[in-house]
Amino acid sequence: MTATLTRADTAPVASVKRRRRAPGWLAVVPLLVFTAVAFGVPAVAVVNGAFTVKDAATGATAHSLSNLTTSLQGPYLTALLGSVKLSAVSAVLAALLGLPLAQAVVSSRSGALRQAVLTASGVLANFGGVPLAFAFVATLGNAGVLTTHLGLAKHGWSLYGFWGLVLVYLYFLIPLMVLTITPALDGLRAQWREAALNNGATGVQYWRHVALPVLAPSLLGGFVLLFGSAFAAYATAAAMVGSAVPLVTLQISDALSGNVLTGQENVALALSLDMVLVAGVVMAVYLPLQRRSARWLDA
Amino acid sequence: MARRLTPWRWAVLGLAAVYFLVPLAASFVFTVDDPRHGVDFGAYTGIVSADGFGSSLLLSLELAVATIVVVLLLMVPAVTALRLGAPRLRPVVEVICSLPLVVPPIAFVAGIVTVLKWGPQYLSRTPLFQTFVAVQNPTFPVVLVLAYVVMALPFVYRALDSGLRAIDVRTLVEAARSCGASLPQALVRAVLPNLRGALLNASFLTLALVLGEFTVAQLLGFQPFAVWIYNVGGSQAQMSVAVSVLSLLVTWALLLALAGAGGRDRTASSRG
C-alpha cells in the first residue's frame, strides 16, 4: 500500500522544477486550497450562524448577539460550566496520577518496561469514544461484572454521574499525560540530583527546589492538553450517560438534531463558538509552555 | 538512590496495572458470562453475521484509505517544500495544521451541518446542488473524507515533520542532484524512501482516527464502524462490548506492527 502511495505523492512535487525557478510555495497551494474549503467554509458558517437570528414568523434574518447571550444562560451555561468542571477535575487528577507513573517507568531504567508502557499508553490514549464507554459499562455499570460481584449497588455506586465520567476519562487522560511528560522526565539530568544531594539536600528538597521547577512548564502544558482533550470529548459521554450529566458537547448535539427544542440550531452554533473560544485560550496557554519546556529538553 | 525507591515504584506500577487491566478483563468476562449456560462465546461468534457489521466496517476502511491517500497527497509535498523551497511558509502551515486542535470535532460538525443545509436552502436551482447531493451519498460519504482529512492534519504534520527533521533533506537532494538525478528523481528515490517510517506512522494515526471516529459521522447521520457499535449497544449489550474489546486488540496489534516496522520510539514521540 505504501508503495503506491509513495509514487502518487510525488506528482505535485515533481512539477516544481527548480531549473525554471518555479516557486516552492506551489507545492503548498493544494493544502491551502483544501483547508480553505473543507475547514474555512464550515468555520465561517459557524461564526455567521452564531450571530444570525431568524424570525420564525416572517423568515427574515438579522444579525444580533442574542444567540450568544442565550448560550451563556440557563441550561446552556450549566452545561458549559459542567464541561469546564469535568475537564478540569479529570485533567488535574490525570496529571497528578500520570506523573508518578511516568517517573516510575523512567527511573526503572528498564528498556522493556518503558517500551511496553509507552506503547500501551499510545494505544490507550487513543482508546476513547464508544468502545471505552461500553467497556466501563460492562465493568461498573448497573449490570457490570464488578458491580454485581462486589454488590456495589448497595453502597450507592452509580457509574452514570459526574465521578463515573471522571473515572472513565482518566482511562485515556493518564496515558496521554504519561506520553506528554516522559520526554521532560528524560530531560532531568542525573547530575542535577547528584549535585543537590552532594550539597546536603534530601530527596524531597531535590524534588521541591530542582525537579518540579524544571518540570513546571511541561506539567502545566500537559494539564492544558488534557483539559482540551477532555473538553472536546463527546462520544464517551454520549454513549455512557446520555444527558444525565450536563455537558456542552451533549447540548450542541441535542440542539443540532432538534431533540429538545426545534429552531435551536443557531444556539448550537453559538455554543460551538463558545467552545472554540475556550479551546483557543487553552492552546494559547499550551503553545508557549511547550516551547519553554522544549528549551530545557534540547539544552 | 534509585534502589531505595523500588517498593514505591512497584506500588505505582501495580496500581496502574489494576486500573488499566481490570476494565478489559471485566469486559471480557461480561461478554462470555451467561447466567444460564456458564461460559458462552456466542457474543463473539455472532459478530460476523450481525446485521450491518460487514457494511459498516467496510465503509470505515474505505473512508480510512481515502483519507490517508488525500492527506498524504496534500501534506507530503507541502512539508517537503517547507524544507526545500519555501521555509517562510512554515508558520502558515503550522497554524493551519493546529487549527483542528482549537476547533473541537463537535463544533466542526456543527459548521458542516450548517453548510450542508445551504444546498437545499439556496442552491437547489444551481448545478452546485448536485455536488452537495454527491458528497452526502450514503454509500460513500465524501463529506466525511473531507472532515477526516482536516482532523488528521495535526497528527500527520507532526509525524512527517519529525520524520523530515531526522534526515537532512537539502543535503540529500543536493547529493542526489550532483550524482545526476533530476529533482523529481531525487525526491522519489532519495527523500521518500527515507520517510518510510514517518509515512507509515502518519497512515496509522489516520487509520486509528477514522476507525474510531464517532462524533462527525453520527451527527451527519452516517453509519461507519463506531456508530454501528453505538447503535448495536442499545439492543445487544454483550455483542457491543465484545466488538469494543476486539477493536482495542486490533488497534494494539496495528500499533505493535508499526513499532516493529517503523523503528522504535516513533509511536511515542509522535504525540508528545
Image (tube, helix red, strand yellow):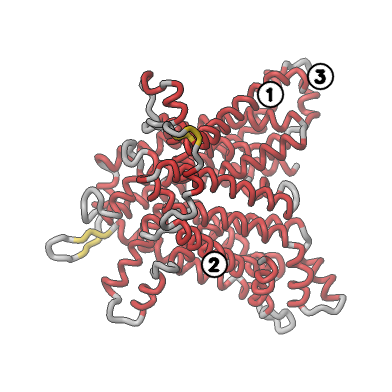
Q: Look at mark 2 in the image and give the residue it sits on.
A: B66
Lower sequence index among marks 2 and 1 = 1
Q: Chain of mark 2?
A: B
The spot of residue B6 in percent (x, y) is 73, 21
Judging from the image, mark 3 belongs to the subunit labelled: A
Q: CA distance from mark 2 to mark 3?
A: 59 Å
Say what amino acid the circle numbered 3 marks.
Asn
Q: Amino acid at mark 2?
A: Ala
- SS at badge 2: helix
Q: Which mark is residue B9?
A: 1
Q: Quadrant of the C terminus of chain B?
A: top right
Q: Secondary structure at mark 3?
A: helix
Left or right of residue B261, residue A180 in this image: left
Judging by the rendered image, the residue that carries numbered circle 3 is A198
Q: CA distance from mark 1 to mark 3?
A: 24 Å
Q: Residue at x 80, y 24 (%)?
A: A195
Please give left or right for residue A31 compared with residue B160 in the image: left
